[in-house]
Image (cartoon, grey):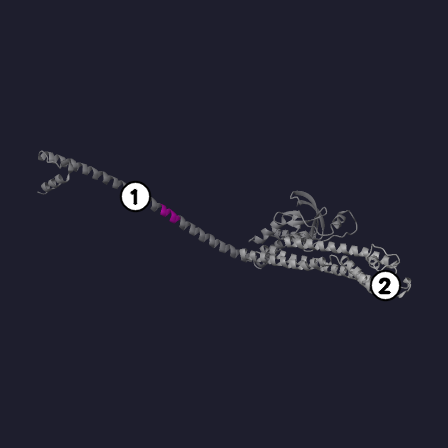
Amino acid sequence: MKELLLLLALALLTPAVSAQPADLDALLRDIREVRNTEQAAMRERETRFLAERNEQQSRLRQAEEALTQVQAEADRLKAEFDRQEQALVNAEAQLAQRSGNLGELFGVVRQAAGDTRSQWQDSLLNMQFPGRKAALDQLAGSRQIPTLEVLESFWFLLQQDMTASGKISRFVAPVVGLDGEQRELSVIRVGPFVALQGEDYLLYQPEAERLQVAERQPDGRGLVDDFMRPRTELADLKMDPTRGNVIQQLQQTPSLTERIHQGGVVGYVIIALGLLGLLLALVRLAWLQRTSGRVNRQVADLSHLRRDNPLGRVLGVIGNHPRIEQLETLELKLDEAILKETPALERWQGLIKLVAAVAPLLGLLGTVTGMIATFQAITLFGTGDPKLMAGGISQALITTVLGLIVAIPLLFMHGLVAARSKAMIQLLEQQSAGLMALHLGGEDKEDV
């Protein structure tokens, strides 16, 4: 009964037999074919499943074997690490036992080697003895007990440095010229203080292991040439007791031209005004000096009045024989003549004084603009790098200095010019008044 119901269900579900069969045998045949097809598919899936299961089991076994090997290797390495650690502990204990009190001594030796290496970092002697820094580095960084040979080598380096510090030596070393070219040249070393090549002082560059011609040389280069000549007596030579630091600082010190450039446009204007004021003052002093000479010659010969000097022109107004009734008129004419001569004698004094007054104001202007540039640099970049503020501060200070340098001499020059011109005007008034009194009093001219 169950088989009959199953056949009826299959017949209803199977599309291939949805049509009514001709007879029960055909229906049975169709059902058998469908069943065989499904059984073949199931066997295929079962076979594939079994194959995959076998493959996974094989991979599992390989992973377990690999894990077993790794664990064994880890155990072996751990055992080796423990053994090495124990050996290290034993070796350190043996080292401490054997070194005894010498361990502290060797520590002092290593520290002394490190300190010596720092002191010799910028020494000129490294150019003549290039391998000594490496030996000190090896001794300072060693963790082993130094041998007797190493200690003797360290002592020899110290003795070599002391001996070479008191000698003048000549050797060949790489030297970089002002043109940037490096050449092998003969160099004279005066202790650890200075190195000379020709008439030039050299700077030591420890990073590149070479010498460089200093762009800015100290004064007294003629002493270098005299020092290098063959001689038996002593010779003078400028030394750098700081072992090159003074010459290094000299390279960073701005020259006069660089100082002027730091002042910027305001500095150039101040210098131009200063030169203009100085030129005007010198021209006026020369003119007043020449005029003063002519006036002095005229004073010595009042009987012959000349028109090439202010005194002659002023006295020429009253004539050689003035009359008493013309006294008031003559006084007015003398005053008028003196007033005509005064502008020529006082010419350009106001301009000189104006330049002397404007120069400090321009210096103050440069100070303000320099401080503005400084604060702008601080706003943009902060105060971490002082070099970023150096330009504004230099302009602020240089312009003030230039303004004072221009103003102070010009004030003295103005005072000198004003005093000379004032003395000239007083001389004109004195001589004209005295000569008029002489003529009106009827006295001899030679008694004046």
- CB-based contact (under 8 Å), mark 2 and mark 1: no
| Near-viewer residue (394 or 428) | 428
Residue 246, image x, y percentages: 67, 54
- Is 132 placed left or right of 338 in the picture? left
Against 66, residue 423 (above or below) is below
Reading the image, the residue beneath label 1 is: 56
| Near-viewer residue (141 or 265) | 265
Q: Answer few, some or many: residues within 10 Å of disc 1's Cα (few below 14, many 20 plus, some between 14 and 19).
A: few
Q: CA distance from mark 2 to mark 1?
A: 144 Å
Q: Secondary structure at mark 2?
A: helix
| Near-viewer residue (362 or 18) | 362
Against 3, residue 250 (above or below) is below
The quadrant of the picture occupied by the N terminus is: top left
Would residue 336 be seen by someone viewing this image from the given angle? yes
Would residue 245 be seen by someone viewing this image from the given angle? no
Circle nearer the N terminus (2, 1): 1
Determine the image quadrant of residue 273. Answer: bottom right
Question: Given the image, on which type of amino acid does mark 2 rest?
Answer: Met
User: Magenta segment: does it hold 69?
Assistant: yes
- Is 24 placed left or right of 235 in the picture? left
Question: Given the image, on which type of amino acid does mark 1 rest?
Answer: Gln
**Which of the two marks, 2 or 1, is nearer to us in this view?**
2
Magenta residues, start to end: 66-72
